[in-house]
Image (tube, grey):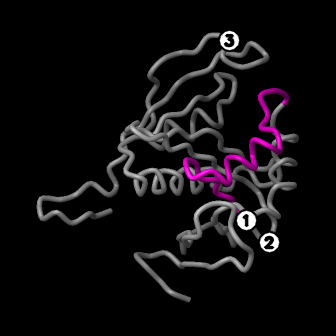
Amino acid sequence: MPQAQGFILEKSKEPFFGPSDETPQRTSNPSGLRLRLAKFSDLPHLVKIEMESFDSDRFSPRTLHRLATRPTSCMLVAEMDGAVVGYAAVLFRAGVRHARLYGLCVAKVARGRGIGSHLLEEAEIRAEKHGKTGMTLEVRCDNPAACILYANAGYIEVCQLPSYYADGCNGFRLIKRLNRFTPSISGKSHP
């Protein structure tokens, strides 16, 4: 299998929803974790994760499909032992310097294993490859696990969002500057 900069590149046998590029696979992932672009057969699994994880503000199957198929977005999937256990959805708007992490969710049975951190890191890499210099996101103020994940990854609070969610819960808008592939003086990018 081809290797590049500490990653294993894996090809899917099924056509991707999104761009047909290969997704780097970290060699240090927890116990068989594989990150890849979403494919059509993932949709029922993504819907199930949404239903078990959120009481309100869920993505509909149609929204999940759109996030996975539009050229202005990327839907990453985390898979362990052949089962879809999480996703990250990223939006890339033309003329906007920052990407937006539109959703990140890990199935209840797979939480606490670092999967969210791996999805977040891969989402940031994808954003940078799309020429974005930062990532923004919104998070519920009553979701301490997500708040800790983002804080540990270097996100900072930009503002509070009163009654942002459908159930009236407040949120926070967070931002992070991305510079993993910032050109050096020699003009070459480096991680």
For badge 3, the amino acid type reads: Ser
Using the numbered discs, state the Cα–Cα distance from disc 2 to disc 3 in whole angstroms: 38 Å
Residue tagged 1: 79
Residue 181 position by quadrant:
bottom left
The residue that appears at 12% across and 59% down in the rendered structure is: 185
Specify the farthest residue to the left. 185
Using the numbered discs, state the Cα–Cα distance from disc 3 to disc 1 in whole angstroms: 34 Å
Residue 52 position by quadrant:
top right
- Position of 189 with respect to 77 (left or right) is left
Residue tagged 3: 163
Residue 123 got which mark? Answer: none
The magenta segment is: 55-79
The percent coordinates of residue 102 (x first, y second) are: 61, 38
- Position of 111 with respect to 72 (left or right) is right
Residue 82 got which mark? Answer: 2
The residue that appears at 51% across and 54% down in the rendered structure is: 121
**Nearer to me, 24 or 33:** 24
For badge 2, the amino acid type reads: Gly
Q: Is tag 2's residue or tag 3's residue first in the polypeptide sequence?
A: 2
The residue that appears at 64% across and 63% down in the rendered structure is: 37
The percent coordinates of residue 173 (x first, y second) are: 52, 25
- Position of 74 with respect to 155 (left or right) is right
